[in-house]
Image: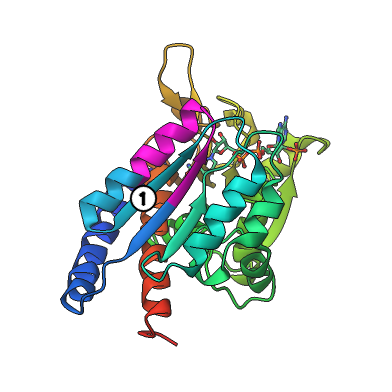
Amino acid sequence: MGYTLINGKFLASIIKEDLKIEIDSLRKKGIIPSLAVILVGENKASEKYVSFKEKTCQEIGIKSIVFKFSEDTQEEEITKLIDELNSNPSVNGILIQLPLPKHIDQNNLLLKIDPLKDVDGFTPYCLGKLLMDEPLFVPCTPKGILRMLDTYEIGIEGKNAVIVGRSIIVGKPLSLLLLKRNATVTICHSKTESLEEITRRADILCVAVGKPNFITEDMVKDGAVVIDIGINVSAYGKIIGDVDFERVKEKVSFITPVPGGVGPMTIAMLMENTIFATKLQKGLIE
Ligand code: NDP
């Protein structure tokens, strides 16, 4: 049985083309969507993600402003900036690049972001709305995964969906989205016993652990759909996922590559959320 590669890079490029058209029509109304990104410290991976986001903004016509703070910055200084960005009508989206240095309380800062500008969907308000099945901004990675499943017409209802990883940015919101679409959802984590027995029952297996080749072929059911969210750097400096792609691909019906799968979709969804925020703030949607 052959497998189908879920081409996130290609799908993201189509989404970005559509967004460009929308941005052009906003510009004709004198509206320039803008995204403020807050980066604290010298985390190399974070710097890279922020530069991807900046580049994509430029590519499609969103104004991006990156605020860089040194590792030892105090929380109050960042809070002050968030207050200013909240009240600045020319800023439509605000995101804090995670993780933050240990001395800063991440939840405290997220609480400060105006929910109408919360393009990452991580504020308690947006997460609460998601829990209530009335999403406002949906976190970008889970949103991108659902978009990929839908585009490839992969059925979700009634399926066993297993998610490995329970972070607030991936695993937890993804579980809510899949549950809303009537999957039977299991979330696994580092304390899960007999993990492979659970993953082998998955019709849809989503992995966000952050360990290279963590999912091996014996952990996957024949014909499963495998979504690899992990981003790791191999011993040879190559970007690889959490799934042993070369072996697992022979068993599955659909699989995402790394790179070129979930990553580009995450950024495309951030762009989509920023346009949505702009339209919401300008009264162009209810
Ligand atoms: P976290 O480190 O926050 O979470 C990792 C999760 O994996 C935790 O829930 C942890 O369990 C679980 N875990 C760790 N070891 C095991 C194990 N042996 N068995 C089962 N579960 C285990 O990571 P994130 O969710 O932030 O990110 C995960 C990966 O996804 C990373 O590689 C990250 O770079 C990538 N990522 C990719 C994105 C993209 O756009 N493609 C976006 C966001 C993240 P516990 O809770 O018990 O500690």
Identify the residue under disc 1: 65
Image quadrant of ligand 1? top right
Secondary structure of residue under mark 1: strand
Does residue 44 show up magenta in the picture? yes
Q: Residue 39: where, in percent of width, then height?
A: 49, 40
Residue 24, relative to residue 66: is it above or below? below
**The N terminus is located in which quarter?**
top left
Chain part drawn in magenta: 37-53
Q: Left or right: where does residue 181 sit relative to residue 260? A: right
**The C terminus is located in which quarter?**
bottom left
Does residue 201 show up magenta in the picture? no
Residue 41, relative to residue 18: is it above or below? above
Residue situated in front as seen by the camera: 271 or 243: 271
Q: Is residue 82 visible?
A: yes
Type of amino acid at the residue the image marks with label 1: Ile
The residue at the point 52 percent across, 72 percent down is: 116
The residue at the point 42 percent across, 57 percent down is: 270
Q: Left or right: where does residue 187 sit relative to residue 191? A: left
Residue 237, relative to residue 125: is it above or below? above
Q: Residue 110: where, in percent of width, then height?
A: 63, 56
Dot 1 crowding, Cα within 10 Å, few <14, some 14–19, many 20+ = some
Colouring scheme applied when the structure was drawn: rainbow
Q: Residue 271: where, in percent of width, then height?
A: 36, 58
Q: Left or right: where does residue 67 sit relative to residue 284? A: right
Residue situated in front as seen by the camera: 183 or 38: 38
Residue 151, relative to residue 238: is it above or below? below
